[in-house]
């Protein structure tokens, strides 16, 4: 694939009129270089023009985005993709609308980023488009939002720190959602209840099989998950506290596992690497209650009449495109903590700890992820050349991505813990 540097745009934001899309457009306007050539795209010229007019006040000195009207048909997207070096896609549910976007980008050597958390769809597009994207030099990175960038970046940071500072592999990383103050957008709710209408139980089971997204087979676990955790969902973890089942863990685990495989598997994080993710709770009783509530909720989604009822309630609570008010969003925060254990023959193996924290709108953070990752791909020529192309993961952007996030008021820190 020839160089894309002469294309009309550096990036196109697809879905700019949605809740996440508008916040992403805001961050681009406020924080990205003023010489960036970009456009917003969607079906309605009128609504897109309103977005452009609304973001002018954030930075009147910069080049304002152009408007590109396009539907989600493959024909329109094949015409749109060659105009730009990169597409940011905020149109969900992704399993329903976004496969043609990935296809058009993969075919045209156009980089692509999205913020899905839909593991079955990610599994599907890996099977369909990884080799096409690789052949054409298109870097396709799904799940570069709250799912699953924080998890992937913390696991990458910890494994690299243990290798560089201790000259050891990593055995296990245990992560915990330490704090999550946010309310879901309409698009998130629509996605959560729609997956089971689109995929069969067999397809879902295949996509959620451990290491399903890894390009190479995963290691057989050398880490014994406590019996109490398997039965009741509760785990006591030093430095993290009392943990329980997290409903958002599955897509994050799958992406971390794919990163392990893409980086070389046993030669990267280690031959026995495992990643587990939970959420922090006040005590074991709360953990047990939450664990079984999550299990019952998933069971309810598998029963069509109950799923339809939940879908109806979700649509009336928040329609897609809607989310928290500006005042409520400003009070939000998110913190993920993780502890990694070095793989060494010791009764008390050495450990490292990492933290990812952001204070402010969690959906604005999603826009930050997209925009800052885009700048890494657009400006770091050496890294993009090294990556080549294909269906990759957030952590493949490495330290340049972390540095840009830190400049965007994200706290991301790690340290080796004192020997016990």
Image (tube, helix red, strand yellow):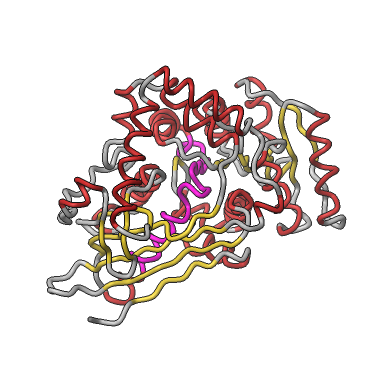
Residue located 25% across and 67% down the image: 341
On the image, the x and y values in percent for residue 116 come to 51, 39
- The quadrant of the image that shows the C terminus is bottom left
Residue placed most toward the observer, 331 or 117 = 331
Q: Nearer the viewer, residue 94 or 166?
A: 94
Residue for point 71% across, 50% down: 326
Q: Is residue 295 above or below residue 285?
A: above
Q: Residue at x 36, y 66 (%)?
A: 158
Q: Is residue 1 magenta?
A: no
Query: Furthest-top residue in view?
Result: 305
Query: How many numbered marks does the figure carry?
Result: 0
Residue 89, picture quadrant: top right
Q: Is residue 194 among the parts visible in the rendering?
A: yes
What x and y, as percent, mark residue 280? 38, 58
Vertical relation: 353 (above or below) 233: below
For image coordinates 63% across by 26% down, the residue present is 78
Q: Is residue 335 left or right of residue 362?
A: left
159 in magenta: yes
> Residue pushed farthest front?
285
* Stretch of the chain drawn in magenta: 133-160
């Amino acid at each position: 694939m020839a160089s894309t540097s002469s294309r009309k745009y550096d990036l196109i934001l697809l879905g700019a009129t949605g809740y996440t899309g508008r916040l992403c457009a805001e961050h681009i306007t406020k924080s990205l270089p003023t010489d960036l050539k970009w456009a917003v795209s969607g079906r309605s010229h009128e609504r897109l023009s309103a977005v452009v007019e609304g973001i002018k006040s954030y930075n009147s000195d910069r080049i304002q985005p152009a408007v590109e009207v396009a539907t989600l048909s493959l024909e329109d997207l094949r015409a749109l993709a060659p105009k730009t070096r990169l597409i940011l896609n905020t149109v969900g549910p992704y399993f329903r609308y976004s496969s043609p976007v990935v296809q058009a980008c993969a075919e045209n050597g156009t980089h692509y980023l999205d913020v899905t958390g839909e593991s079955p769809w990610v599994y599907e597009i890996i099977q369909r488009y990884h080799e096409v994207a690789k052949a054409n030099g298109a870097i396709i990175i799904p799940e570069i939002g709250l799912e699953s960038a924080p998890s992937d970046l913390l696991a990458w940071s910890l494994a690299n720190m243990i290798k560089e500072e201790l000259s050891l592999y990593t055995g296990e990383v245990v992560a915990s959602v330490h704090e999550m103050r946010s309310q879901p957008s309409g698009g998130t709710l629509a996605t959560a209840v729609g997956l089971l209408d689109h995929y069969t139980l067999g397809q879902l089971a295949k996509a959620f099989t451990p290491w399903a997204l890894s390009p190479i087979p995963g290691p057989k676990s050398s880490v014994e998950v406590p019996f109490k955790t398997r039965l009741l969902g509760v785990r006591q973890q030093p430095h993290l506290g009392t943990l329980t089942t997290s409903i958002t863990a599955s897509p994050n685990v799958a992406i971390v596992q794919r990163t392990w495989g893409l980086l070389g598997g046993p030669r990267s994080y280690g031959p026995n690497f495992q990643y587990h993710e939970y959420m922090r709770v006040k005590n074991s009783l709360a953990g047990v209650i939450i664990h079984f509530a999550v299990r019952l909720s998933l069971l309810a989604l598998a029963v069509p009449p109950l799923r339809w009822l939940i879908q109806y309630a979700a649509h009336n609570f928040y329609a897609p495109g809607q989310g928290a008010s500006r005042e409520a969003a400003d009070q939000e925060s998110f913190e993920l903590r993780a502890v990694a254990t070095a793989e060494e023959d010791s009764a008390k193996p050495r450990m490292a700890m990492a933290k990812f924290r952001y204070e402010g709108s969690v959906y604005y953070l999603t826009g930050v992820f997209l925009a800052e990752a885009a700048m890494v791909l657009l400006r770091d020529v050496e890294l993009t050349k090294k990556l080549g192309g294909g269906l990759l993961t957030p952590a493949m952007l490495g330290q340049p991505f972390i540095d840009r996030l830190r400049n965007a008021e994200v706290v991301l820190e790690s340290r080796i813990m004192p020997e016990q």
